[in-house]
């Protein structure tokens, strides 16, 4: 396989005279030649900018020309997908500039963190060349550019130091003119994981036009910034993403036996839709009580919908559940006129006032309110039970639902059992107890047991 | 059910970022995909989510992400890239109340324009809009099918009320539409990445990393993927990107039509509000009002023929949707052949059957 397999032999490099990009392209070609990879296993992913013209120079490689700064993310996507395919082994090579490295910094950080098998060659010429020589986040202090006419005064980002913190296993810094650059690029591509080389070069269109740069300019910049050259010491080699993911999949628990399907009970007749609102406090199993109720309805052959709400901080404040129950498929799921409202805490009561539920109650609405709470500002039939005291705050909502069901005979008591039996054993007993208490409260109301 | 639909459609790659009200899809895919030989991944932002999906799709896997308005805002660059590079990808867009971070836990249908009109140059994105869990399943499979067939990004546009309401699904009777994969390149001709004979044809696909060289690019290109400026070959490809969608518009059209041939009013609604509208139409008929009902499941391309058929004998069209300016109504208006067009609009809560009935009856008075 000759070098022509990679860089076309008659390739006319479309770069300005003296531009480092030409050198990188030649060295990349030599690196691929060293590696002897089949051309179809290399995906050249290029960014916007002069360096993005490189894809047309490699006629036999797959090329993906992308949006600014995103090349690393697209290449990572290709490599990630490849890691679940057999035999895999694709080698995306990303060409970006200093501008692309900054706008796509998050992609570099994440690719390093994942250790996905992508090699990134950052062409750092300290400015945006294609758009007219504006400074970038990697421009050294003092450099004159189109946007820093008196010299750049913001310290440049040390890309390699940053990626080291993201656990990058292969990091190196070179001049575009380094004779051993091809060997380093080959080493990076062969590395089974994320590898990045920052290649320092000068933009002859802008960098050298506005600055008095000597032949040693790059060396001086490196010295001034305290940059280390060559391959940096990195943390010990760690597994590539492909390997990590394979291990992860292998460690998945073997398939659990599906929970036994609830035994279908004789269908329940429900003359019309029923709408129920349950309101309480976060952490007091309001929404899970509603979920159990819906499962029970499902067992009884009814249609059900369940919506929940809570404040942004999910562990504090109110907790709300809205349930529709119907013999027919349910269309509208709103709560214009609830049939029953169960309120088990002051948080819940405040929320129902705030969201307008109380205002929408009608004289026919059953308002089951915990005995400790003040009267809600709502029309309806008020029914007070000591839910929190009798059933504990954590089971008050479930007890409330059970009490309501016992009073209204919406669903036969047997369906609870079917629904509750699906709970994990550690929660089943408490739930059964809550239901029993709710049912007792409904029937012994007025007996003064609590 | 969106996640279940994606799995049924053969989705093997998912990248996501947490966002209410789309996080459930992300969580289910993270749980389900690894055991099925796929890969689900948390991305560091929505830009990366969609870039990863597009990369995976270029490699040959069916891919999806899920987001809401704020995440869509970040994805637009890559939506356009997918369109330009003819890369299949499905975006489940679960609307919430906007603008900006808006109301994370409130439903809305305010992103119809945002999704459809996101692409520079005005290119069409196919958009499907489910109103319930069954349709989420069904339309997700259709979204994948059309994305694969047309090699283009497709949006599944639901909202918080559809996405986060638990409801009963009859799995036994849930039919999975036939699953369609992208057409692979075969044949003796040299592979051309964006090759087509007629501009409405869809190029046959070859994955990057395969034996056929791929030249993918988001810049203006000819059929071979070469960057050229304003040449006739480039303009032909740019026209082709729209023509392939237009040519399949009729086939893509999915609606639920409940037509009363004697009705002079037609009620149109989609997504979550279609449920209230369907119920309102039923109740109005009980009250003796003659009214037709149409629910477009395909929002874009607009199901032109179904709408035209529903217009027979109709004097007034009412469009119910949960946004302020009547976004889909504005799209439909020029296609309603001079009928009176009224909007039923609201934000901050579901439009109820009662509100729709009141509007229809008010019109009669």
Image (spheres, grey):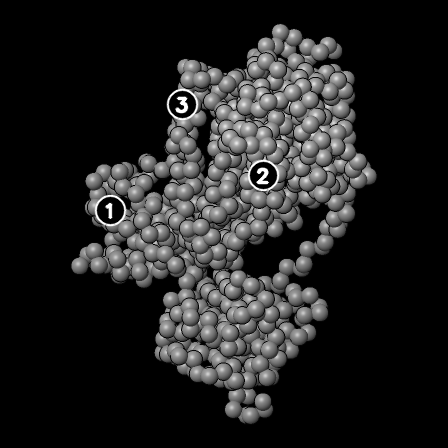
Question: Label 1 marks which chain's residue?
Answer: B
**Please, what secondary structure does the residue beneath circle 3 have?**
helix
Q: In the image, residue A381 lies at what x, y percent?
A: 41, 81
Quarter of the figure with residue A402 = bottom right
Looking at this view, name the residue that lies furthest to the top: A10
State yes or no: discs 2 and 1 in contact (Cβ < 8 Å): no
Do the dots labelled 3 and 1 sit on one chain?
yes
From this view, report whether residue A430 is shown above or below residue A238.
Answer: below
For this rendering, which residue is in front, B190 or A174? A174
| For residue A125, side relative to residue B264 (left or right) | right
What residue did someone put label 2 on? A154
What residue did someone put label 3 on? B239
At 57% from the left edge and 64% from the top edge, which residue is drawn?
A314
For this rendering, which residue is in front, B220 or B156? B220
For this rendering, which residue is in front, B24 or A410? B24
Any part of residue A96 in sight: no
Any part of residue B33 in sight: yes
Q: In the image, residue A208 lies at what x, y percent?
A: 58, 21
| For residue B330, side relative to residue A180 (left or right) | left
For discs 2 and 1, the disc positioned in front in the rendered view? 2
What residue did someone put label 1 on? B341
For this rendering, which residue is in front, A353 or B264? A353
At 59% from the left edge and 84% from the top edge, which residue is drawn?
A389
**Please, what secondary structure does the residue beneath circle 1 have?**
strand
Question: Label 2 marks which chain's residue?
Answer: A
At 48% from the left edge and 33% from the top edge, which residue is drawn?
B80
């Amino acid at each position: 396989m000759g070098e022509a397999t990679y860089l076309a032999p008659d390739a006319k490099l479309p770069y300005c005279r003296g531009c480092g990009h030409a050198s990188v392209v030649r060295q990349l070609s030599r690196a691929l030649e060293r590696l002897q990879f089949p051309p179809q296993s290399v995906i050249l992913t290029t960014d916007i900018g002069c360096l993005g013209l490189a894809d047309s120079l490699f006629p036999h490689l797959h090329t993906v020309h992308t949006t600014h700064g995103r090349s690393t993310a697209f290449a990572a996507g290709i490599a990630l997908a490849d890691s679940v395919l057999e035999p895999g082994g694709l080698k995306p090579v990303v060409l970006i500039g200093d501008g692309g490295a900054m706008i796509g910094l998050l992609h570099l950080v994440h690719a390093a963190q994942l250790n996905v098998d992508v090699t990134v060659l950052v062409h750092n010429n300290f400015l945006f060349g294609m758009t007219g020589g504006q400074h970038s986040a990697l421009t050294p202090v003092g450099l004159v550019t189109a946007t820093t006419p008196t010299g750049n005064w913001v310290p440049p980002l040390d890309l390699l130091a940053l990626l080291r913190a993201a656990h990058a296993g292969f990091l190196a810094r070179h001049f575009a003119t380094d004779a051993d650059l091809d060997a380093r690029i080959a080493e990076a591509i062969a590395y089974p994981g994320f590898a990045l080389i920052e290649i320092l070069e000068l933009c002859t269109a802008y960098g050298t036009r506005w600055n008095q740069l000597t032949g040693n300019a790059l060396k001086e910049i490196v010295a001034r910034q305290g940059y280390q050259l060559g391959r940096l010491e990195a943390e010990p080699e760690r597994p590539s993403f492909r390997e990590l993911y394979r291990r992860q999949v292998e460690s998945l628990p073997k398939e659990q036996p599906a929970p036994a399907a609830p035994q279908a009970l004789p269908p329940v007749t429900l003359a019309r839709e029923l709408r129920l609102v349950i309101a309480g406090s976060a952490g007091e199993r309001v929404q899970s009580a509603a979920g159990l109720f819906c499962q029970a309805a499902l067992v009884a052959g009814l249609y059900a919908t369940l919506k929940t709400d809570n404040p942004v901080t999910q562990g504090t404040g109110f907790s709300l559940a809205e349930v529709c129950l119907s013999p027919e498929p349910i269309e509208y799921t709103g709560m214009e006129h609830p049939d029953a409202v169960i309120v088990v805490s002051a948080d819940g009561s405040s929320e129902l006032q705030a969201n307008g539920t109380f205002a929408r109650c009608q004289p026919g609405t059953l308002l089951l309110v915990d005995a400790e709470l003040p009267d809600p500002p709502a029309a309806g039939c008020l029914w007070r039970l000591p839910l929190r005291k009798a059933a504990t705050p954590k089971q008050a909502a479930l007890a409330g639902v059970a009490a309501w069901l016992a009073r209204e005979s919406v669903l036969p008591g047997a369906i609870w059992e079917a629904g509750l039996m699906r709970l994990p054993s550690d929660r089943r007993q408490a739930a059964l107890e809550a239901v029993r208490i709710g049912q007792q409260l409904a029937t012994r109301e007025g007996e003064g047991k609590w | 059910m969106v996640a279940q639909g994606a799995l049924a459609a053969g989705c093997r790659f998912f990248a996501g970022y947490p966002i209410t009200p789309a996080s459930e899809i992300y969580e289910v895919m993270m749980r389900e995909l690894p055991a099925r030989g796929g890969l689900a991944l948390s991305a560091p932002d929505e830009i990366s989510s969609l870039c990863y999906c597009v990369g995976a799709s270029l490699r040959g896997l069916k891919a999806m992400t899920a987001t809401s308005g704020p995440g869509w805002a970040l994805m637009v660059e890559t939506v356009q890239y997918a369109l330009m590079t003819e890369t299949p990808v499905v975006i489940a867009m679960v609307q919430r109340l906007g603008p900006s971070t808006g109301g994370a836990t409130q439903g809305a249908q305010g992103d119809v324009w945002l999704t459809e009109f996101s692409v520079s140059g005005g290119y069409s994105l196919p958009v499907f809009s489910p109103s319930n869990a069954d349709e989420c399943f069904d339309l997700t499979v259709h979204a994948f099918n059309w994305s694969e067939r047309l090699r283009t990004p497709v949006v599944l546009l639901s909202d918080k009320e559809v996405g986060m309401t638990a409801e009963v699904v009859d799995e036994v009777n849930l039919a999975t539409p036939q699953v369609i994969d992208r057409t692979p390149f075969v044949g003796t001709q040299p592979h051309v990445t964006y090759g087509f004979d007629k501009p409405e044809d869809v190029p046959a696909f070859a994955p990057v990393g395969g034996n056929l060289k791929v030249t993918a690019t988001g810049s203006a290109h000819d059929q071979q993927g070469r960057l050229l400026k304003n040449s006739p070959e480039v303009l032909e490809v740019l026209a082709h990107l729209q023509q392939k969608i237009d040519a399949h518009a009729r086939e893509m059209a999915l609606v639920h039509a409940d037509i009363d041939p004697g009705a002079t009013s037609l009620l149109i609604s989609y997504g979550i509000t279609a449920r209230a509208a369907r119920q309102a139409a039923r109740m109005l008929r009980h009250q003796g009002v003659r009214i037709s009902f149409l629910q477009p499941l395909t929002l874009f391309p607009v199901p032109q023929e179904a709408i035209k058929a529903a217009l027979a004998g109709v004097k007034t069209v009412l469009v119910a949707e949960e946004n302020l300016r009547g976004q889909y109504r504005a799209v439909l208006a020029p296609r309603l052949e001079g009928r009176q067009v009224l909007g039923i609009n609201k934000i901050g809560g579901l439009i109820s059957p009662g509100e729709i009935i009141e509007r229809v009856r008010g019109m009669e008075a």
